[in-house]
């Protein structure tokens, strides 16, 4: 398999493919995200991805507990 076959959109490894979204957020939330990104040395996009991953992980754990 060639290196090109292992890569997805934008040269990212397959499985790490990303898409762009443009949510409309309150300015206060954007400010909080910007401050968190600076504090954690991440880009705004990286901070949003991190926060969403954490939220979804917690949500899935709650759903699993409720189902058992």
Image (spheres, rainbow, N blue to C red):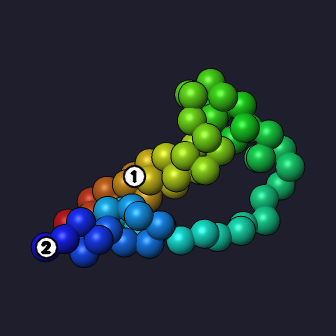
Please say whether residue 2 is visible from this viewpoint: yes
Percent across and percent down for residue 13 are 32, 62
Residue 36 in the image: above or below residue 62: above
- Nearest the eye: 22 or 53: 22
Asked whether, in this view, residue 39 is left or right of residue 49, the answer is right
Percent across and percent down for residue 3 are 24, 66
Q: CA distance from mark 1 to mark 2?
A: 37 Å
- Quick one: which residue is furthest to the left in this view? 1
| Residue at 61% across, 50% down | 45
- Nearest the eye: 65 or 10: 10
Q: Residues within 10 Å of mark 2 (few under 14, many from 20)?
A: few
Residue 39 in the image: above or below residue 57: above
- Nearest the eye: 65 or 34: 34
Residue topped by disc 1? 58
- Quick one: which residue is furthest to the top in this view? 39
Query: Which secondary structure, mark 2?
Result: loop
Q: Earlier in the sequence, mark 1 or mark 2?
A: 2
Residue 30 in the image: above or below residue 25: above
Percent across and percent down for residue 63 are 34, 65
| Residue at 19% across, 71% down | 2
Residue 28 appears in which quarter of the rendering? Answer: top right
**Quarter occupied by the N terminus:** bottom left
Q: Residues within 10 Å of mark 1 (few under 14, many from 20)?
A: few
Residue 23 appears in which quarter of the rendering? Answer: bottom right
Please say whether residue 59 is visible from this viewpoint: no
**Quarter occupied by the C terminus:** bottom left
- Quick one: which residue is furthest to the right in this view? 27
Asked whether, in this view, residue 14 is left or right of residue 30, the answer is left
Asked whether, in this view, residue 33 is left or right of residue 10, the answer is right
Residue topped by disc 2? 1
Percent across and percent down for residue 18 are 48, 67
Query: Which secondary structure, mark 1?
Result: helix
């Amino acid at each position: 398999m060639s290196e090109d076959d292992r890569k997805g959109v934008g040269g990212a490894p397959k499985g790490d493919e990303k898409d762009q979204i443009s949510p409309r957020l309150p300015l206060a939330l954007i400010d909080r995200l910007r401050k968190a990104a600076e504090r954690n040395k991440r880009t705004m996009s990286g901070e949003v991805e991190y926060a969403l991953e954490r939220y979804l992980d917690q949500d899935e754990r709650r759903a699993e507990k409720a189902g058992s």
